[in-house]
Every structure is written in C-alpha cells, then in structure tokens.
Amino acid sequence: MIINNTTDMPMPLVRIALRHALDCLPDKGAGIELESVTIRNKMEGKVSGQWGWYKPQSKQIVVIVPREMPHGYKIHLKHARQYLTINTRVEFLIAVVAHEMKHAHQWQVMKTWTVDTRSNRWYRERDAEQYESDTTIQWMNMIQKVASSS
C-alpha cells in the first residue's frame, strides 16, 4: 500500500494510525487490498464538509484532514446515533480512515455491495460509523494508558 501524505503530520505517526485502524478490523484486515491511502489538508479554516471516501475500483482511500483541529470537536454519527468527540488531527485521521477501511472491508470481504438497497446502504453506513467510533475510542484509551504510565 502506498501512503501519500501531503500534510505536516509525521509519516511514522501516520503509519501507526493507519495500522491501528486496520488492526481493529476482523482478522486484522485480512482480505482487504488497498493500492493507496492519500491524506491531504482541508482548505484553511475548514473543518466540516467531505472528509474522506473509499474508491472501490481503484482500491484507494482518500482522507482530508483539517489543518487545525478545534479541541472537543463533535462529529455526529447519525446512522450510529451517537457523537464522537475529537481533540487532535491524529484522532480525526483515525476516525475517518477507520470509517473508509470499514467500507473497504464491506466491499471486498463481506461483499455487502452485491445487494444495493436503501436499507442495506443505511446498515453499511451505520456499521462504518460504529467502527469509526470504536476504533477511535480504542486509540484514545491506548494513548491515555501510555501517557499515564510515563
């Protein structure tokens, strides 16, 4: 997998974040083929709007990260019926890339795109949002544990 990172986030941290999102999938993401993950900055001053997408034909994930993350930014996960509070750009990256990796898993492993009904789309999105939340919270807990043991 090629990682295209045009943000100022350090590459080693980006790799760790991507690995975390992949490792939280069933069988640590076995069966998912990704050609590339592209991480870019959003326009100056922007946080809301389109954050990422999975392109199944090219097996590519694109994530757009805000240049500055307001502390305590709440993401509304409407299909999962919950809010996720994000404090850092890395947490934001993990949340969005986890969401898109879940879509890759749904497409390539679970084959849930073979039946494309309105209710099936809703369940796929709910599943991706729940994975986004769970994976980000696991990351936050891991960081807090490491920080408190130092």
Image (cartoon, rainbow, N blue to C red):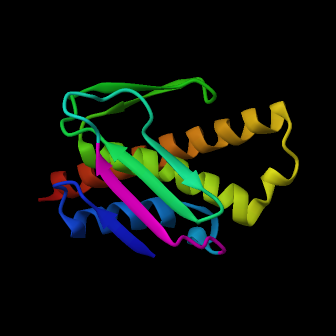
Residue 149 on image: x %, y %: 17, 58
Q: Residue at x 60, y 73 (%)?
A: 33
Magenta range is 31-41
Q: In this view, does 117 lie to the left or right of 123?
A: right
139 versus 120 height, above or below = below
Question: Could you say which is closer to the camera, residue 41 or residue 18?
Answer: 41
State the residue in front, 12 or 147.
Answer: 12
- Quadrant, the N terminus: bottom left
| On screen, residue 56 above or below 118 | below
The x and y percentages for residue 144 are 25, 48
Q: Is residue 65 left or right of residue 62?
A: left
Residue 108 belongs to magenta span: no
Q: What residue appears at the point 53 percent right and 25 percent down from the top-left corner?
A: 82
Image quadrant containing the C terminus: bottom left
Query: Does the image show residue 141?
Result: no
Return the x and y of residue 35 as percentages of the image width and height: 51, 72
Q: Which residue is drawn at 62% across and 59% down?
A: 104
